[in-house]
Image: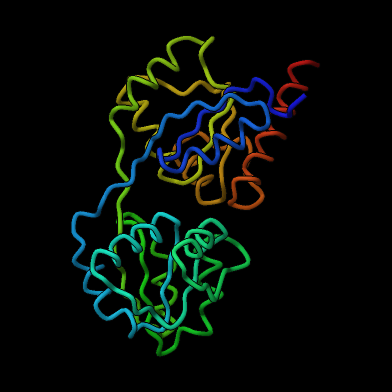
Amino acid sequence: MPTLANQRILVTRSRHQASDLAAQLEALGAIPILIPTIEIVPPASFSALDAALTCLGTYDWLLFTSANAVEAFHRRAQFNHITQLAKKVAVIGPATLRAANAIGLTVDLVPPQYVAESLAAALLPEAPGKSFLLVRAAEARDVLPETLTAAGATVTIAEAYRNQVPADSIPALQQLFAQPETYPDAITFTSASTARNLFALLEAANLALPESILRASMGPITSQTLRDLGFPPHVEAAEPTLPALIQSLEVGLDSREKSERF
């Protein structure tokens, strides 16, 4: 029997990212429920990114901390007919690496752990006197630019997109949580934004998250956000990748089933 047979899993990723996770869950017998808690929209202004793109070749390093940043950067570079690139490229993890490779970028550095702290540490030897262009979301942690700046680098931050709460998810959540029989068995949180936004949507819908639903976190930053919200994760992925997240789900749901059985 598939490891996640008939398990109802709420996927909170943005619409364009949810299909990959849903397909992997379905392959293991799960029933994914796609209700996005974030949607990716353009930044309030492209001025910073456009200005950086005009002199892209002058930067020593081009940094990406998400696949969304890579895709938004690529669209804007095409719009501005930019072909010259920074001297080197660094990304935060395997999903961002795949996105960079997909648009033809050669990536020079991927940190050993897929979090901003590890990327900053890996870049520290490069920092003194070097210039970095960080392409990211409008709302993001400042660990990376602050660490590099403190080490003597010049860091330019260019907002390429922003996360928005999709209001049309409220009726879908109201239907999902209408009665215990329709509750999901687990919820996946793939970023701090998906966690914050789900609880914002639940509050707007006048709903509370049942404690019985397994909360699965993609990584330490997401887990800390859940703890700050008063709902610590039941399981956390060993590394911030979809296979690791799914493995944590399998372990968590299997443990819960065994405890209920005995």
Give the residue drawn at x 56%, y 27%: 9
Q: How many marks?
A: 0
- Name the foreground residue: 78 vs 226: 78
Residue 16 figure quarter: top left
Q: Quadrant of the C terminus?
A: top right
- Name the foreground residue: 28 vs 166: 28
Give the residue drawn at x 34%, y 33%: 200
Give the residue drawn at x 52%, y 69%: 119
Q: Position of residue 249 (x, y in %)?
A: 65, 35
Depicted 126 relative to depicted 9: above or below = below
Q: Quadrant of the N terminus?
A: top right
| Left-right relation of 71 to 226 | left
- Name the foreground residue: 77 vs 229: 77
| Left-right relation of 26 to 225 | right
Color style of the picture: rainbow
Depicted 250 relative to depicted 84: above or below = above
| Left-right relation of 127 to 47 | right
Q: Position of residue 159 (x, y in %)?
A: 29, 62
Depicted 33 relative to depicted 159: above or below = above
Q: Position of residue 13 (x, y in %)?
A: 45, 39
- Name the foreground residue: 174 vs 33: 33
Q: Position of residue 63 (x, y in %)?
A: 43, 70
Depicted 230 relative to depicted 48: above or below = above
